[in-house]
Image: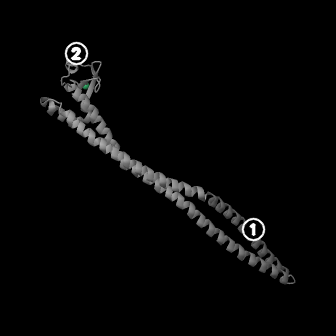
């Protein structure tokens, strides 16, 4: 037959376990929120990559359009130069200056187009990896949701089972001590109970009187005279 202190030990174990279960259940929504934030971030990164490609393609088209215009203008200027060759020197110089500027612009545009193409190429090459990464992120998220569902079901089943076991164990507390027990666990939770090891209360680390240690060891209900917690001997 189990003693009162055996009952207290069991109640302590179950109450610690129930508290840990509740904490883990409560953590669920916070974990989910963090995972959702991470998924949103990964989705944004994926979208940004594809948007960057669209923008670079547009930029390349615009630069090529401007280059074409510049080339047409340059050809026109050059043909005018031939026809103005016989004209006044001043006009000739002005035309040459215009041609020089148009050529510089053409070169700058060609460089810009090359840079845009290189940037675009880099992004396009990375598309497969970026798409794969996003697909994996979604699969990971779905898997973690599934895992969380299974875990939560397990935690809740354990909770129901442990709660029933606690109620059953608590029937072993003598009626005369029940009010004290209820009051203390309501105030302190699992910390209302504590083992005594080597004549020392493990809650407040204070030495316990020899007489009380003997009572506790014999299985009687007793409180630490320093911290007021319910005592039971370590096994
Ligand atoms: Zn104590």
- Front residue of 162/178: it is 162
Residue 67, given in percent of the width and then of the height, sits at 71, 73
Residue 229 visible in the current orientation:
no
In this picture, is 125 found above or below 178? below
- The single residue placed furthest to the left in the displayed view is 176
Judged left or right of residue 184, residue 41 is right
Judged left or right of residue 195, residue 115 is right
**Residue labelled with disc 1:** 107
Judged left or right of residue 233, residue 145 is right
Q: Residues within 10 Å of mark 2 (few under 14, many from 20)?
A: few
The quarter of the picture where residue 63 lies is bottom right
Residue at 24% over, 19% down: 208
In this picture, is 16 found above or below 92? above
Q: Nearer the viewer, mark 1 or mark 2?
A: 2
Mark 1, secondary structure of its residue? helix
Q: CA distance from mark 1 to mark 2?
A: 98 Å
The quarter of the picture where residue 120 lies is bottom right
Judged left or right of residue 70, residue 174 is left
Residue at 27% over, 34% down: 14
Identify the image quadrant of the N terminus.
top left
Residue 61 visible in the current orientation:
yes
- Front residue of 18/197: it is 18
**Residue labelled with disc 2:** 210
Residue 173, given in percent of the width and then of the height, sits at 17, 30
């Amino acid at each position: 037959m189990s003693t009162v202190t055996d009952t207290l030990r069991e109640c302590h174990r179950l109450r610690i376990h129930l508290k840990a279960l509740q904490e883990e259940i409560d953590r669920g929504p916070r974990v989910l929120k963090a995972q959702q934030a991470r998924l949103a971030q990964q989705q944004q990164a994926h979208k940004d990559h594809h948007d960057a490609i669209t923008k670079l393609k547009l930029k390349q088209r615009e630069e090529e359009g401007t280059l074409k215009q510049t080339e047409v203008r340059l050809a026109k200027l050059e043909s005018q130069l031939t026809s103005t060759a016989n004209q006044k020197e001043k006009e000739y110089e002005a035309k040459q200056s215009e041609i020089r500027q148009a050529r510089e612009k053409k070169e700058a545009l060609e460089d810009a187009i090359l840079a845009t193409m290189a940037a675009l190429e880099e992004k396009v090459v990375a598309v497969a990896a970026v798409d794969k990464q996003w697909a994996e992120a979604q699969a990971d998220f779905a898997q973690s949701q599934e895992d969380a569902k299974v875990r939560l079901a397990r935690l809740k089943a354990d909770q129901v089972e442990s709660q029933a076991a606690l109620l059953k164990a608590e029937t072993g507390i003598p009626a005369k001590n029940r009010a004290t027990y209820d009051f203390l666990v309501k105030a302190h939770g699992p910390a209302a109970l504590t083992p005594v090891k080597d004549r020392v209360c493990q809650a407040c680390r204070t030495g316990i009187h020899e007489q009380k240690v003997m009572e506790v060891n014999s299985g009687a209900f007793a409180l630490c005279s320093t911290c007021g917690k319910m005592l039971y001997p370590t096994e």
